[in-house]
């Protein structure tokens, strides 16, 4: 399999992985936001997604943090309506 070489495609993959995490772990995400331990609750799933991302994207793009930004945008920013101790 060829590695993803463009920033656009790397961003799309990162967002797709984060969207899948959101879709399949909605209850964990909500509770993690409420309890302010989201990254502890989803550590295994986030790292599994990160490993998939790293295996599919050229190394020079991995360091641009598209995956981390997608996690924040999709798992946190999109759920800002949920009451939390943080906000």
Image (cartoon, rainbow, N blue to C red):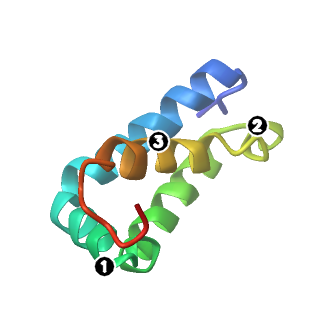
Q: CA distance from mark 2 to mark 3?
A: 18 Å
Mark number displayed over residue 17: none
Indicate which disc residue 35 carries. 1
SS at badge 3:
helix
Judge by depth and name the residue closer to the eye, 53 or 64. Answer: 64
Horizontal and vertical percent for residue 46?
46, 63
In what element is the residue under mark 1? helix
Q: Which residue is mark 2?
A: 61
> Which residue occupies the foreground of this view, 49 or 78?
78
* Residue lying at the far right of the rendered structure: 60
Q: In the image, is residue 35 above or below residue 23?
A: below
Q: Residue at x 36, y 73 (%)?
A: 85
| CB contact under 8 Å: marks 3 and 1 | no
In front of the other: label 2 or label 1? 1
Residue 51 lies in quadrant: bottom right
- Front disc: 2 or 3: 3
Does label 2 or label 1 sit earlier along the sequence? 1
Q: Residue at x 48, y 50 (%)?
A: 71
Q: Is residue 24 left or right of residue 35?
A: left
Q: Residue at x 79, y 47 (%)?
A: 63
Cα–Cα span, label 2 and label 1: 33 Å
> Which comes sooner in the sequence, label 2 or label 3?
2
Label 3 and label 1: CA atoms lie apart by: 19 Å
Mark 3 nearby-residue class (10 Å; few <14, some 14–19, many ≥20): some
x, y percent for residue 33: 32, 67
Q: Which image quadrant for residue 6?
A: top right
Q: Quadrant of the N terminus?
A: top right
What SS does tag 2 mark? Answer: helix
Q: Which mark is residue 73?
A: 3
């Amino acid at each position: 399999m060829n590695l993803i070489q463009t920033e656009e495609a790397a961003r799309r993959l990162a967002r797709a992985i984060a969207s899948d995490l959101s879709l399949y772990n909605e209850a964990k995400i909500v509770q993690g936001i409420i309890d302010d331990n989201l990254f502890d609750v989803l550590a295994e799933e986030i790292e599994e997604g990160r490993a998939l991302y790293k295996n599919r994207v050229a190394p020079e793009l991995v360091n641009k943090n598209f995956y981390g930004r997608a996690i924040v945008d999709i798992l946190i920013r999109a759920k800002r309506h949920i009451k939390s101790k943080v906000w």
